[in-house]
Amino acid sequence: MHVGEEYSIIPAFIINMAGCNLTCPTCPERERWNHLLRPLPAEAYARALISHFDKTSWPKSIEWIGGEPSTQMPYVFDTTWAMRALHPELPTVYLNTNAYFSPFLNPMLAGTGAIDAFVFDLKASPPCARHITGASDYFDAVSHNILELARLMPRAPHILRHLVMPGHVECCTVPILEWCKKNVPDLCFNLMTTFHDFRRPPSIPAVLPQNEADLAIHFAKSSELPHLLINGDPA
């Protein structure tokens, strides 16, 4: 159970998935994947989750996160369907995704009744995509999928996150704010200034300098996005 997510979805029950299709050099999760256990079969895991919630407390939302959960969607679908069969009034189920996947997945994500909404992660602008994510086509692929899923599920409470990277305020944060204002202004936009590089020794600043955090927040507030959050709280 996690209370460090956006204010509108906490407490959120987090289901961590191993593996990712990006190679972000500052990712803090990759080492943890080596210690994950083999999951239960989907129906058994669904029963275990429902039993756990009944015995403890029910969350406001359930999040499938990674790594990158879209790489393991059959398990996500099967487990979520099984949970819905056991408890039809299931809390909002989010797929917390980097959105870097084939667009052929979009109709299944939007139309199977498993996923209620998405927490998207928009990391970088086109010139910096390879450096930050390891994928040169990152922005085109991700922006397309965000647009398509927002179109297919227009009333869902989607969230779009952007983690500000040191040295990337004007080249990434500003263009991303402008793109969101133009293309998906109705999405809840969460500007995050909580970057931390867990590598030793770090190749870039270990945390976002305060002056860059302040500048990013200034640009975000100036963008006049109607549903703006700063580190998960209303701006």
Image (spheres, rainbow, N blue to C red):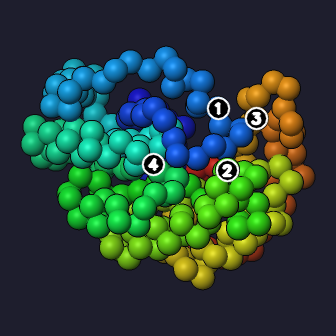
Mark closest to the chain's N terminus, 4 or 3: 4
214 lies above or below 221: above
142 lies above or below 198: below
Task: Tell me the amino acid under the disc marked 2.
Answer: Gly
Mark closest to the chain's N terminus, 2 or 1: 1
Where in the figure is residue 169, as x and y percent of width and height?
Answer: 81, 61
The Cα–Cα distance between marks 3 and 2, rounded to whole angstroms, is: 16 Å
Task: Tell me the amino acid under the disc marked 4.
Answer: Asn
Q: Is residue 214 visible?
A: no
The disc at residue 28 is 1
Q: Which callout, 4 or 2, points to the residue nearer the camera? A: 2
Helix, strand or loop at mark 2: loop
Where in the figure is residue 158, as x and y percent of width and height?
Answer: 43, 62
Q: Which residue is mark 4?
A: 96
The Cα–Cα distance between marks 4 and 3, rounded to whole angstroms, is: 21 Å
Q: Which residue is mark 3?
A: 197
Who's the residue at 30% across and 24% down the image? 39
The Cα–Cα distance between marks 4 and 2, rounded to whole angstroms, is: 19 Å
Helix, strand or loop at mark 4: strand
Q: Nearer the viewer, residue 82 or 181?
A: 82
Q: Which residue is mark 2?
A: 134
Where in the figure is residue 30, as x and y percent of width and height?
Answer: 59, 30
